[in-house]
Image (cartoon, rainbow, N blue to C red):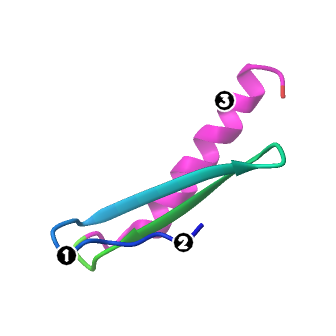
Amino acid sequence: PLSTLPATHLLNITLFSYAGTLYFGLIATDALPNLGRLARYIDEEITALETAVGL
């Protein structure tokens, strides 16, 4: 997904679902240098949630 970042924000997380899949879009300023780490954490936790509910 395409995210926008207003001048007064440090982080925007956009998500939508399509055809049974949930998509995340992350965008941040340089004030949040570990955006890749946040993306990995989200992926890990979504995987854990899917496992917990049997998906």
Q: Which residue is mark 1?
A: 7
In this view, which residue lies farthest toward the bottom? 30
Query: Percent from the top left, x then y, of residue 26?
Result: 47, 65
Query: At numbered mark 2, what does the secondary structure look like: helix, strand or loop?
Result: loop
Q: Is residue 52 magenta?
A: yes
In the image, 22: left or right of 27? right
Q: Gap in Å between the C-alphas at discs 1 and 3?
A: 33 Å
Image quarter in which the C terminus is found: top right
Q: Quadrant of the N terminus?
A: bottom right
Compared to residue 3, the image places residue 47 above or below, namely above
Q: Position of residue 22 (x, y in %)?
A: 69, 48
Q: How many marks?
A: 3
Q: Amino acid at mark 2?
A: Leu
Tell me the element at label 3: helix
Residue drawn at point x = 83 percent, y = 21 percent: 54
State which mark lies toward you, 3 or 2: 2
Q: Does label 2 or label 1 sit earlier along the sequence?
A: 2
**Residue that label 3 marks:** 49
Q: Nearer the viewer, residue 53 or 7?
A: 7
Which secondary structure type mostly characterizes the magenta part of the structure?
Answer: helix
The local crowd at label 1, few if under 14, some if 14 to 19, many if 20 or more residues have their Cα within 10 Å, is few
Q: Earlier in the sequence, mark 1 or mark 3?
A: 1
Amino acid bearing label 1 = Ala
Q: Which residues are magenta?
A: 32-54
Residue 4, percent from left and from top: 39, 72
Quick check: 22 above or below 30? above
Tag on residue 2? 2
- Residue 4 located within the stretch drawn in magenta: no
Which residue is drawn at the image coordinates 22% and 65% (left, top)?
A: 9
Q: Amino acid at mark 3?
A: Leu
- Report, in whole angstroms, how far the alpha carbon at label 2 lies from the one at label 1: 16 Å
